Image (spheres, rainbow, N blue to C red):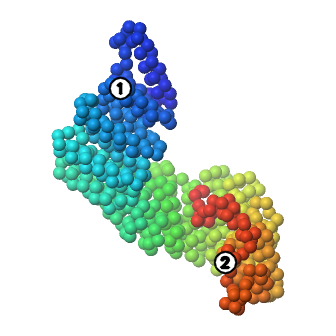
Amino acid sequence: AGCRSEDSFGRTMSIIERMEKWAKEGHEHIRPNIRSWNSVLNALSRSNDPNACQRAEEILWSLSMPDAFSFAAVLGTYQKSSEPGAAQRADEILQKMEELYENGEIESPPDVYHYTIVCSVWAKSGDEVAIPRVVQILSHMQERHRAGYPEVRPNTRTFNAVLDCLSRGKEVEKAEQLLYHMLTRYNRGDTSAAPDSFSFNSVIYAWTRSKKRGSGRRSESIMERMLEYHRDENPAVRPDARSFSHIIGYYSRSKSPDAPYRAEYLLNRMVAMFKNGYEELAPTVYSVTTVMDAYAYSKNPDAGQAAERLIKLMHILREKYGATKFVENTMVVNSAIHAWSLSGHEDACERAEAWLDLMERKYESGAIELKPNTRTYGLVLSAWTKSTSPEKGKRALDVLHRMEAQLERGNKEVKPNEHANSLVINACAFTNGSVEEQEEAFDVALAIFNDMLESNNARPSSLTYGWFMQACARLKKSEASRDSHIERAIQICCQNGLVNDFVLARFRGSASDSLYKKFLAPVLTEDLLEASMERPRIILSQLPKAWTRNLFKKNRARGESKSPWWEEGAS
């Protein structure tokens, strides 16, 4: 029964069949008994058989006197099941078990284990009735315990199943109340209900996923109570990395001005406890990069410096404290570049490029863990788009050329795609400087745009057209020259079916009045012209469908992501 082989059910059934055959031949003492069938049920509960629940029930109801283990094994199959209705069916089996016992048809009533399994199945179900049902089950267990059923008293696992259900269902206030109820019971001597790490982490996780105001501080208060519980009440319950990482992750998503500082504070507490012997709290690369992200997404001016400070901390922990999981890899350096790119710091571009230099140099020397990828170069390009340097367009072009060189040298993790090229155009479009510098920036933007039109791998997107039109408008070309380039861009954009709100807004802000009215003449009605004699506003639904026909396809090809490609999960 303890075998975890994929075919353990088949093997146990084969043995049962042989036993039944021998019994028919006169060896009655070999006939399968309840323990034999329980071995089969146990094998089913451990198997990945998609029909395990149905098969287990068929066996259960065929038994003349199933025992507590029989029911537990069948409920275990439902605990593993992801089928709709699994929780409801497990609940019905539990109720049937109660009924059979009350009618004297089985010897054992449901105990705490049976009720806990059903609560666990409900918690996993995500069903809208899950929370009220597990609360009912918990109350029912306590009533039965008071009525003289000692084996049904809720224990830590029961409460944890209910906490898990409340946490998943975002009933965070109720989850916290239940946790404190467990603490009260424990302090009154009920050690069977002692909260463990899972108990605290469930409530911490619930708060970090809550949209209630002050959720971060509430999750921190639960962690503080956990540390106090560990220190003064139950030393066996120790915080683990999840206790901290859930809250650090919350602050990385928070828009609160103090979020990055709270995230780093928690990381430092983790580090301090790790140094004091809590090996399970060894910070990971993920926990450190999450703090970097907290600084980056808050656009904190100290973000880049904080990222570099955290990388130095990684080196210290690895070299002096044996934190071997700390490896300075592509994900870590990308997070540092990301922090610099969003910091707005005057040295952001130079520092981002310095990290890129380091990666390229070390990768060329054989450090495969520092292989730069598309995201690496995209983040450096993003930094240059935010620069105030009059050379930003030229410097962005240099980064693009470095991408191309990496690909030529065999680095298949680098793809100079549409957005990388478009970011160069963006950097050019927002160049401020002398007339000569702006003309040079425009020449770069025009060359990139023309290259993209001929490319198979970096065809212009809606963003490309919009940014190129902005480059035409901002870089002080004559009106005739400006309109010539803008008209060409909007025509190609329409032909490719990529006109969206961004393109339309950029065209309206860039084109001359005459070009704007000329090009949109097919959709400019007299009412629109009378309402706005200068530049009537047009919405997408008023345009020919051919001009917007590929918007959905383009978005679907790029994953319809809310975040730009260079800020997403690839390390």
Figure quadrant of residue 418? bottom right
Q: As drawn, is 221 to the left or to the right of 542?
A: left
Instruction: Bin the neighbour count of mark 1 within 10 Å (Cα to Cα): few under 14, some 14-19, many 20 and up.
Output: few
Q: How many marks?
A: 2
Residue 77 against residue 219 in the figure, above or below:
above
- Which residue is label 1 attached to? 63
Residue 236 against residue 494 in the figure, above or below:
above
| Observer able to see residue 298 | yes
Mark sitting earlier along the chain (1/2)? 1
Q: Residue at x 61, y 52 (%)?
A: 369
Q: Amino acid at mark 1?
A: Leu
- The answer to whether the residue labelled 1 contacts the one labelled 2, judged by CB atoms less than 8 Å apart, is no
Q: Amino acid at mark 2?
A: Ile
| Frontmost residue, 252 versus 558 | 558
Q: Residue at x 62, y 55 (%)?
A: 370
Q: Quadrant of the N terminus?
A: top left
Residue 560 against residue 473 in the figure, above or below:
above
- Which residue is label 2 attached to? 539
| Frontmost residue, 49 versus 530 | 530
Local SS, label 1:
loop
Q: Residue at x 63, y 59 (%)?
A: 559
> In the image, residue 282 lies at what x, y percent?
43, 52
Q: As drawn, is 38 to the left or to the right of 508?
A: left
